Image: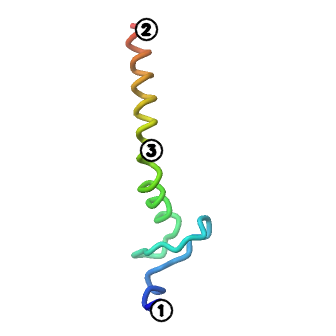
Amino acid sequence: MRSRHRQTTYLDPRQGNMYPMLCPRPLDVSRVVQVRLGNSERAMAQSEMDHKRQHEFDVKL
């Protein structure tokens, strides 16, 4: 089972984690994984900041 997985699993040198991939491009895939895991919180915080910034802009007008 492990040997079958080895064909589609590549080591990401930055994370030290094994990700299942379709093609050996570790950096792209790790970026996708980070987007999936971390960006929901970051996007929420960013939209909150944008909302505050828009509010400040409206107040200035």
**Residue contact at pointers 2 and 1, CB within 8 angstroms:** no
The residue wearing badge 1 is 3
Instruction: Determine the residue located farthest toward the top in the rendered image.
Output: 61
Q: Say which of marks 2 and 1 sits in front.
A: 1
The residue wearing badge 2 is 60
Which part of the image, by quadrant, shows the N terminus?
bottom left
Q: Nearer the viewer, residue 58 or 3?
A: 3
Q: Is residue 12 left or right of residue 36?
A: right
Give the number of callouts.
3
Q: Position of residue 13 (x, y in %)?
A: 61, 70
Q: Say which of marks 3 and 2 sits in front.
A: 3
Q: Position of residue 27 (x, y in %)?
A: 53, 64
Q: In this view, does 37 lie above or below 12?
A: above
Choose the circle earlier in sequence order: 1 or 3.
1
Is label 2 in a helix, a strand or a loop? Answer: helix
Residue at point 44%, 22% (across, down): 53
Q: Position of residue 7 (x, y in %)?
A: 45, 86
* Amino acid type, residue under disc 2 in the picture: Lys
Choose the circle earlier in sequence order: 3 or 2.
3
* Amino acid type, residue under disc 1 in the picture: Ser
Q: Where is residue 57 in the image (x, y as percent from the top left)?
A: 42, 15
Q: Determine the CA span between mark 2 and mark 1.
A: 63 Å
Q: Determine the CA span between mark 3 and mark 2.
A: 29 Å
Q: In this view, does 42 lie above or below 5?
A: above
Number of other residues with Cα within 10 Å of mark 1, as a class: few under 14, some 14 to 19, many 20 or more: few
* Amino acid type, residue under disc 3 in the picture: Glu
The colour mode here is: rainbow
Number of other residues with Cα within 10 Å of mark 3, as a class: few under 14, some 14 to 19, many 20 or more: few
Is label 3 in a helix, a strand or a loop? Answer: helix
The residue wearing badge 3 is 41
Q: In this view, does 11 lie above or below 56?
A: below
